[in-house]
Image (cartoon, rainbow, N blue to C red):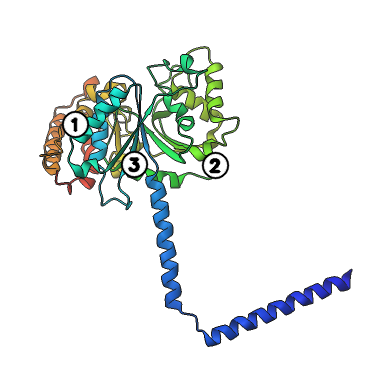
Amino acid sequence: MLPSIKRRVLLLAFICFISINLIFEYLGTHPLDIERFQQVSNQVLRQDQMVEQKRATDIPFILVICGKCIICVSAVKAQVINSKTRDIFIFSTVKFILVTSSNDTYDHITAIVASWPHQYQQKLDLTHSPVWYPSTLESKMRGIYRQCATEDIFLPDMFPNLDAAIFVDTDMVFLRAPEHLWQEFELFTDHEMVGMVPCRTNSSKTLDFKCWNAGLILFNITRLRDFPGGWTQANVEVLDHHSHGLGDQDILNVVFKENPEYLHEVSCEWNYRRTQCQEGFNECPQAALRGISSLHGNAYTFMQDPLMKEVYLGLQKHNLHTSNFSATLNELQEKVKVIIKEGKPGYKFWCANATGIESVFLQQLHNHLPTINH
């Protein structure tokens, strides 16, 4: 046995010796072109980068609209305004999937978008999907909290051909190019499947642990297919185990309390709510550094809080055909200054009282929008 092993080792060494000599002999007559090697390497690297960028732009934003939605058109409009060719990705068109309870809602939104200037229309790739629930769960879950509020739980089942998707509540307005959220997926660990922003306080009456806000959800759908026991089943079991009604956010929070390793914490600047500035100071450190990336008007705060309302209305009133956005931004800034100056302690002036709040609310607009002509 031992001599046989020795013979094999000697044979392998001889083959390696011959191979190395042949390589050196070839290089002696055919010098290695280092410059050509670098050119080919760079070309391959650029192709890899373009593939990664193209994959990123394949990640759609999903909005769920049941019944009439007043804010959703303005939300889409604000997202289009913030999509710019100077952003990091080469392929700047943003995909939106509108999940609606009726074709009329989708037709209404597409008609409005069709009236916008071409340079804004071409930044949108709008598609439609009807609201969907598993047949065995629709009667049980569709009406929880409000119509279709639990639809976000079933998005991975609705779109099995997608690798990833970003759910955005219809009462959320981006103050920065939404494409930047694509980069957040690169920060996921090897185990994380879903990304959400933590709540400052627990607003749930039934849960007594750290919670996460469901207004913005990043889904790695490919990984969710491997969720232990099944993603949908995990959510349904939570609902079955609670005698009192749970909303979609509560259900998701219980799922990730039991499976924290699968949840990625997204920076609070991407889901900024009134609760983060209601105590007289800004409680989102990232927003203090970079400004708010997306403003969430949940609980009707776009109508109740003067500062949030002014920012929302300022974007809503911007005319894509005739308005210069620099002028719109200057007008908005002056109105914000007035609100802050007149602010006083009380329910209606929570955010206006926060120190440095003007920069928190407007910094991203100043950073990303002054170059837009219309």
Which mark is in front, 3 or 2? 2
Q: Is residue 274 visible?
A: yes
The residue lying furthest to the right in this view is 1
Circle 3: residue type: Gln
Earlier sequence position, callout 1 versus callout 3: 3
Residue 373 in the image: above or below residue 252: below
Q: Quadrant of the C terminus?
A: top left
Left or right of residue 20: residue 220 = left
Secondary structure of the residue carrying tag 1 is helix
The answer for how far apart the CA atoms under marks 3 and 2 are is 25 Å
| Residue count near mark 1 (Cα–Cα under 10 Å), binned few <14, some 14–19, many ≥20 | some
Return the residue at label 2. 191
At 54% from the left and 41% from the top, the residue drawn is 191
Circle 2: residue type: His
Circle 1: residue type: Gln
Can you give x and y, in whole percent of width and height, for residue 138 in the image?
A: 47, 17
